[in-house]
Image (cartoon, rainbow, N blue to C red):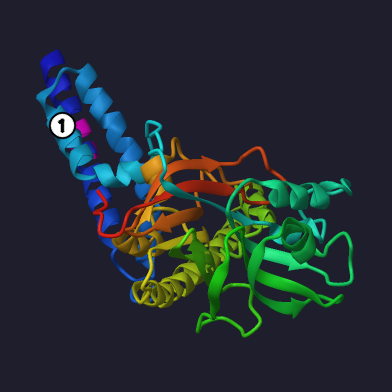
Amino acid sequence: MSGTFKSIRTRVWLVMNTLVVLWMLAGVLCLQVPPSTFWPAGFVAFSLPGALALNILFLVYWVLRRSWLLVLPLSACILAWSYYARLLSINFEKEIPKGAKTLQVMSFNTHVFNAYDKIVKGVPQVSTDMIDWVAEHPADVFCLQEFYSRVNSVEYNNFNRIGTRYGKYKYASTSVGDRVAADLGVVIFSRYPIVEGGTIKFNNTRERSANRAAWANINVKGDTVRVYAVHLQSMSIRSEDIENTYSAIGDENSFKKESRNLVRRLRMGFVARAAQVQQLLEHVQASPYPVIVCGDFNDIPFSYTYNELAKELENAHVRAGNGVGATYNGPLPFLRIDNQFYSQGLEAYRFETHDEMALSDHYPISATYVLQPKGAEQR
């Protein structure tokens, strides 16, 4: 009798493991599908981390059972290794070659420096603390999304506080917003000269939308690197939406209403960002210089948006970072939606998520790149 029960249990676990592997396969396939063509693919891809994690648990189970069936989850792990690297990065620190040209790039969605007091209430110094932290950071290039500056304000004239008083060059892609005519948008500051700059205005956004990309050709000791500061379509999900969905559990009608609202917002975001990333990539592919593409992509590593960028470029966190690298400072944990990608001609040696700066709804990220000699092949 015990032998029969053991056989049934093994079959049940095998079927469950097979279903998880099929889930992984579906998730990987859905990463290739533009959400504008089939929007449910975005949700299947979004769920891929769950399948990857469950597959590891099945591997542990079969190992503990000393069963040859461990070959199933082990094979899936090997075949999906690059996707596990997106989930959790492990890198050993590399020594920067002596005499190498380096470029440290910091990217940060500043949430308008909390000028509207949305993140931390009752702390009047919070915005100036954040501004000073950015201004004094040792990076060579600063890519700031949701940048905010008022010309007629000492406290919020951030072009001056971050750039001018430190002798930085800048390229600003902003539009005038709010009641006090503040500049809102994407800005690149650089300690090295900016030779040329431009703006990519996405076709599916309003003229004055903050969702856009700026680029700048930067002269780094005689070599030119093109840096992009990107802010793709926001998820448009507020912390209140998530909290309302949690609190609605147990009330069927209310839960359905809140869940549909979340699904609708996510679907709209998937579709919008898919079009924007294609427009961005067309520009990147035409660059005559090595590129660094960084910013707030508002999509996790298991999304069509991220996958399209990863086909063309390396990811600095995957190559030089450690851990999950979560960049969203909000009610949903473990979300990495801010990234830095780079092309051949560059190599990432350091990557850091600055969770010590927790005054925005995003954490800043920085990476140090080595400029490779012309003609050198990237690994």
Residue bounds of the magenta highlight: 11-16
Crowding around mark 1 (Cα neighbors within 10 Å: few <14, some 14 to 19, many 20+) is few
The residue at 69%/64% (across/down) is 147
Q: Is residue 365 above or below residue 282?
A: above
**In this view, 121 is above or below 170:** above
SS type, badge 1: helix
Q: Residue 12 lies in magenta, yes or no?
A: yes
* Relative image position of residue 185 (x, y in whole percent): 66, 71
Q: Is residue 184 left or right of 219 when viewed as pictured? A: right
Q: Main secondary structure of the magenta part?
A: helix
Please tell me which residue lies in front, 325 or 250: 325
Q: Residue at x 56, y 61 (%)?
A: 262
> In front: 329, or 140?
140
Quarter of the picture holding the N terminus: top left
The answer to whether 194 appears left or right of 314 in the picture is right
Residue 289, percent from left and from top: 38, 68
Q: Is residue 153 visible?
A: yes
Question: Which amino acid lies under the numbered mark 1 shown in the image of this protein?
Answer: Arg
Q: Residue 116: image x %, image y %?
A: 82, 61
Identify residue for label 1.
11
Give the quarter of the image for residue 15. Answer: top left
